[in-house]
Image (cartoon, rainbow, N blue to C red):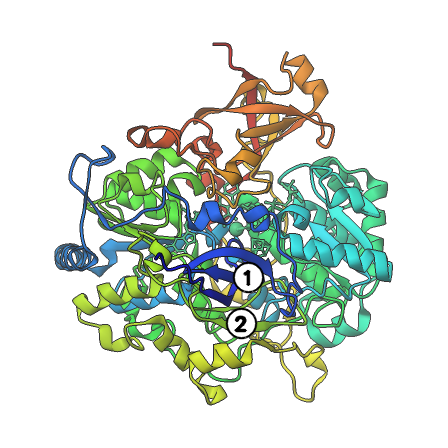
Amino acid sequence: MADTTIEWEVKRASCFLCHLNCGVICTKENGRIVKIEGDPDCPHNEGFVCARLEQDRWKDFVYNPNRLKKPLKRIGERGAGQWEEISWEQAFDEMAEKLAALRNEYGAETLCFLEGTYRTQSNLHYKFTNLFGTPNTGGNGTICYSSDMWLEPCTYGGFCSDKSDWKRADLIVLWGRNPAVSEQLCWEWVVKNIEERGAKLLVIDPRYCEAAQKADLYLQIRPGTDSALAMGFINIIIEEGLYDHEFVEEWCYGFEEIKERAKEYPVAKVSEITWISEEKIIEAARLYASIKPACMPWGEKGGDGCGVNATSAIRAKAILRAITGNIDVIGGDQLTMPSDRGDSDMQYNHNSLSQEQRDKMIGNNVHPGLTFKGWDLISKAYPRFYPYSNAPLMFRAMITGDPYPVKACIVQADNPMLSYSNSKLVYEALTSLELLIVNDFFMTPTAAIADYVLPAATWLERCSIGYPTMDVEQVSMNGTLPVLERFEGGADIDFRDDYEFWYGLSERLGFADEWWGPSMVDMFNDTVAHFGMNFKDFSENVKYLRVPNAPEKYKAEGFKFLTPTGKVELYSTIIEELGEGYDPLPGFEYPPYFPEVNPEHAEEYPLSMITGARFMPFYHTEHRQPGAYRDLHPDPIFDIHPDTAMKLNIASGDWCWIETPLGRIKQRARTTTILDPRVISVQHGWWFPELPETDLFGVFDSNINAILDDSPEVLDSLMGAWPNTGLYAKVYKVED
Ligand SMILES: Nc1nc2c(c(=O)[nH]1)N[C@H]1C(S)=C(S)[C@@H](COP(=O)(O)OP(=O)(O)OC[C@H]3O[C@@H](n4cnc5c(=O)[nH]c(N)nc54)[C@H](O)[C@@H]3O)O[C@H]1N2
Ligand SMILES: Nc1nc2c(c(=O)[nH]1)N[C@H]1C(S)=C(S)[C@@H](COP(=O)(O)OP(=O)(O)OC[C@H]3O[C@@H](n4cnc5c(=O)[nH]c(N)nc54)[C@H](O)[C@@H]3O)O[C@H]1N2
Ligand code: SF4
Ligand SMILES: [Mo]
């Protein structure tokens, strides 16, 4: 008689399909997950989950038949789709042997690492690269939050833009941020605050987006001009005496300097640059300075993603938070400070890397902010900061060998063939390597050109400590053991988690004893040791641990902001120390393609373009595999105003070419009045897993980054950030 016993199991996890790390409960039947629900007891999401988990869509993620099953070794030409399945042991042995040989031949700096948006334990790859001896870790962080993570500590010795007090603010400023799509849990908090507490909402966005539609005041800004607007606000707030006099006098350094600089941005000039009426600019500045407390969370587009003005936009916003007295107050943007536990260097092993190697970090002498050079200057405030090599320079080094040969790259949780600008150059760079290793869930366009492709464990298949981001009052530490073990319930994927990946390599390279042990549990045992228990007990007994933030730290006796002056530096002495060419005060310069500075270019490419405004259900380049996610959004879409579309004889739904000097890609038009007629909005992240691997899944067909520039002229000088908004393009119908 067949065994009909059904075994049920219920396990907790932190969803990592996005950074919010919602607490979830997974129900298993005979070793397979059958249900995932939001955990009502999780103080962060209180049962909320988004569309990525609803309708059982997660099944097409974790149980997707296209997941990588075994380590693959390239046996044909690069990109020819010819692979041999090998064991993990063989993969580790061979990869380590090749890495050691390349290190002997070219020096350790020949290895670089690439990461995308934070999706796994980021300390692990630093630990590995530092112990291996290379300073070269690059990533998308340069245009995503890391620039904030450096510039905010440089301004106020900590950072606050992910500790915005969404639920208790009386005014919420969403500036280049649309959480209604990008962080839906945060949007729940905003809506609740508006409905229950009567909070006001100010939105600054070129698209009349979901958040804008609920705003009390909406500014339809011209893409790429945010720092001009911020300077205009600073000017109005200072000239009208609306700033927080007490906070400025006691706690701000460089007020006269910023006041003088801001005078260069009178409202008429700002209106001309930003396409926003003078009245609205004044109204918005007064609103932000008068309603207290106000929070202004971080936003990718009105800051890190805006190219040459990235530093200025981020700094000017930080200054606005300070002069309006909204830093570290309840309902404002609360300040994080280094933990007083004195984190050991074991997490990152930054101290294992010699100064000689640090000095070789690519970007160190050109865009020093995010490199070790910049980190040294803010490390008092942010000892666990992640330094970054500059990715555009690193790709160029792979191709040219300048400043030295970069011959090997490990890619983990990143899809660089799509996520960085100038994909064709990225392709040239990655295919010129002697060794490319990719660790992912799926065969991506990046994995397709690798030498080794290794199947990764998802968040359901590894243990974790979830630290939900973007949440001010309930930082909950959610320790969980794997929901699924390898091969459980008949699953056929021979994954290793990201810890095991690094440990396996380290073992063969002779530095395993620098790790906590062979398993991630060993690391987490150490993380929770100060609670007097091991990780297993912690995950089973503690469930959620809330660590409330303590606001108004500056009111304590003897407090100093962790900057060189001990104050909020409106004028940055740290940037000054980095030398000429880096401005200690924010401002605005016209980005290279603007008609004001490049009229010929604008004649050929007349439409202002934003790229990568988020849309559901995808997370960047993920979930394109045929199935539940893709069914919700089968084709790439760009938005265009109906008047503009009509002039160009484009109907909604038409496939169109979008062209820049770097080439053209195609997407389908969607006409909408949420945009100014002069602006188009193009989706990012598009590839087509259903197309042949040998064509790299159509990676150049509809991927906007294939035609975006990352050359030195378009980068922010201090951060080296490349632009994904405020660009210029032309569009026309695909005729054949
Ligand atoms: N034009 C334009 N370009 C942009 C942007 C834009 O707005 N416009 N946005 C930029 C921003 S802000 C970011 S953050 C980047 C994002 O860039 P990426 O992070 O490169 O994009 P993802 O598609 O999220 O790629 C992550 C890859 O990691 C894999 N992965 C996910 N989780 C794990 C894990 O736990 N372990 C392992 N080993 N692999 C995992 C996924 O399957 C996927 O292939 O894109 C940037 N690029
Ligand atoms: N669905 C989905 N959610 C995501 C992601 C995803 O890929 N998909 N990615 C995650 C990641 S890594 C990040 S970094 C966050 C980013 O989160 P957000 O910053 O909220 O995301 P975006 O949609 O890139 O940009 C927000 C808004 O900025 C507007 N914008 C574009 N150009 C400009 C400009 O020049 N100035 C101003 N002021 N606004 C501009 C866009 O129209 C958009 O409405 O989203 C996260 N959430
Ligand atoms: S909001 Fe993010 S963490 Fe929460 S359920 Fe959706 S994808 Fe998962
Ligand atoms: Mo990001």
Residue 671 located left or right of residue 609: right
Quarter the N terminus occupies: bottom left
Q: Residue at x 87, y 58 (%)?
A: 198
Nearest the viewer among 39 and 371 is 39
Side of 285 where 186 appears, left or right: left
Question: In the rendered image of this protein, does residue 48 appear above or below residue 717?
Answer: below
Measured as percent of width and height from the top left, residue 471 is found at 64, 65
Q: Can the viewer see residue 132?
A: no
- Residue bearing mark 2: 478
Q: Is disc 1 surrounded by few (<14), some (14 to 19) or many (20+) residues within 10 Å? A: many
Point out which mark residue 330 bears: none
Residue at the far front in the pictured view: 1
Q: Amino acid at mark 2?
A: Asn
The yes-or-no answer for disc 2 within 8 Å of ligand 3 is no
Q: Quadrant of residue 238?
A: bottom right
Question: Residue 170 appears at what percent x and percent y?
Answer: 82, 62
Q: Is residue 250 visible?
A: yes
State the CA–CA distance, disc 1 to disc 2: 9 Å
- The residue under the point 56% across, 23% down is 668
Residue 228 or 445: which is nearer the viewer? Answer: 445
Report the side of 286 relative to 300 (left or right): right
Q: Amino acid at mark 1?
A: Asn
The one nearer the camera, 160 or 715, is: 160
CB at mark 1 closer than 8 A to ligand 3? yes
First in residue order: circle 1 vs circle 2: 1
Query: Horizontal and vertical percent for residue 647?
Result: 67, 13
Q: Are marks 1 and 2 in contact (CB under 8 Å)?
A: yes
Of all residues shown, which one is farthest toward the top? 736
User: Residue beneath label 1, please?
Assistant: 21
* Coordinates of residue 553 in the picture (x, y in percent): 68, 80
Q: Residue at x 62, y 40 (%)?
A: 224
